[in-house]
């Protein structure tokens, strides 16, 4: 992408490796600066609007904390107290918010591709905070940033992405971002009914990624550098009986992991439900809380770049 100033951040596919590595460097610098000075003043006088039309803890709060730590201000759109209840559309809502001149809008919406559909109607840069099952590009940034911090590299790694790959937006964006690096092998680990969508394979098949679909994590666990676990996306199932049938179809706990001679680092975008037992939390390989914290620093780096400050 080159300079990110004023750009919409819609898809992980749009990043170049150089963008990602520059963001790592800025995130590391901001981490140090925030540690010594607390709140900085890069974004002084700038305003971020957070518009989350689907629930969120990490994405919304880490963007808000990041903006405040950069010295900017945040206006949060509160769904439950809004005129959406009167039947106002999401498009009109966004146009109204944009009319108040935010410097950046972070948007989460249920409909796939909604951010790109409205980007041309909105003056402020839009950062996609998740568009239904389609993409979550800033989650991919923090995932790859965590891999880089933990392993010292992103090239030449083997990663197992396990869980509900069909309905999840983090497996797609993570695959797209990893395709910008060299010699990455992805094992998509899921029951057949939850396997990765064809559209994702279509987008990575001509890149440097090597991939394989696997049903059982035991087949590959000892080969992995990273095991990235995801939850079953209950809210995206049309048929509750199918959710019940697949519930519990994959799960890791400490006892399971300790059977293996080599245990990879364990990541998860969170929230978790039953697929990642809390007994794993005290293992040295458990990185998911650190991963969530890393999100604040890489998002601060992204905001700084998009604002051009
Ligand atoms: N990982 C993630 O997107 O979490 P939230 O849904 O809480 O933002």
Image (spheres, grey):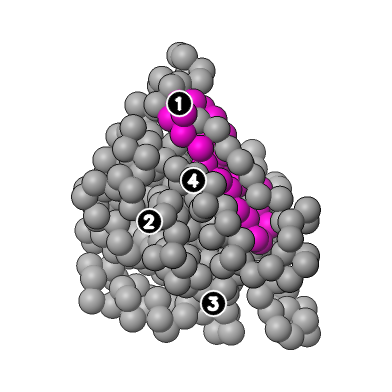
Give the distance between the C-alpha atoms of the residues marked 4 and 1, in whole angstroms. Answer: 15 Å
Q: Residue at the front extreme? A: 99
Tell me the residue at 56%/67% (across/down).
91
Give the distance between the C-alpha atoms of the residues marked 2 and 3, in whole angstroms. Answer: 26 Å
Residue receiving disc 4: 101
Residue receiving disc 2: 8
Q: Secondary structure at mark 3?
A: loop
Tell me the residue at 64%/45% (across/down).
76
CB within 8 Å, label 3 to label 4: no
Image coordinates of residue 258 in percent, x first then y, are: 59, 51
The magenta stretch spans which residues?
Answer: 43-71
Q: What is the number of the mark on residue 44?
A: 1
CB within 8 Å, label 2 to label 4: no
CB within 8 Å, label 1 to label 2: no
Residue receiving disc 3: 166
Mark 3 beta carbon near ligand 1 (under 8 Å): no
Q: Judge depth for marks 1 and 3 and give the one in front.
A: 1
Say which label, 1 or 2, has the lower sequence index: 2
Mark 1: few, some, or many residues within 10 Å (few <14, many ≥20)? some
């Amino acid at each position: 992408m080159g300079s990110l100033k004023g750009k919409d951040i819609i898809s992980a596919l749009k990043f170049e490796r150089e963008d990602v590595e520059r963001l790592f460097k800025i995130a590391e610098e901001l981490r140090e600066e925030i540690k010594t000075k607390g709140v900085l003043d890069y974004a002084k006088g700038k305003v971020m609007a957070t518009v989350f039309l689907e629930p969120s803890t990490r994405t919304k709060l880490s963007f808000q904390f990041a903006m405040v730590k950069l010295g900017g201000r945040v206006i949060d759109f509160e769904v439950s107290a809004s005129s959406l209840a009167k039947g106002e559309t999401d498009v009109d809502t966004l146009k109204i918010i944009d009319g108040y001149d935010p410097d950046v809008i972070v948007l989460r919406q249920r409909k796939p591709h909604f951010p790109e559909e409205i980007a041309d109607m909105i003056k402020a840069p839009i950062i996609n905070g998740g568009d239904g099952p389609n993409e979550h590009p800033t989650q991919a940034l923090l995932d790859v940033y965590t891999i880089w911090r933990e392993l010292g590299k992103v090239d030449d790694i083997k990663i197992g992405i396990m869980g509900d790959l069909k309905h999840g937006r983090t497996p797609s964006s993570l695959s797209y971002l990893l395709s910008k690096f060299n010699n990455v092998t992805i094992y998509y680990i899921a029951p057949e009914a939850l396997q990765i969508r064809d559209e994702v394979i279509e987008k990575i098949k001509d890149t440097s990624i090597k991939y394989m679909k696997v049903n059982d994590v035991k087949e590959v666990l000892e080969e992995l550098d990273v095991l990235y676990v995801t939850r079953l996306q209950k809210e995206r199932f049309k048929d509750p009986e199918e959710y019940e049938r697949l519930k519990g179809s994959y799960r890791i706990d400490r006892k399971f992991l300790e059977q293996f001679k080599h245990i990879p680092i364990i990541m998860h975008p969170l929230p978790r439900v039953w697929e990642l037992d809390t007994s794993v939390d005290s293992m040295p390989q458990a990185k998911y809380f650190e991963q969530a914290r890393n999100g604040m620093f890489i998002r601060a780096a992204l905001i700084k770049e998009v604002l051009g400050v």
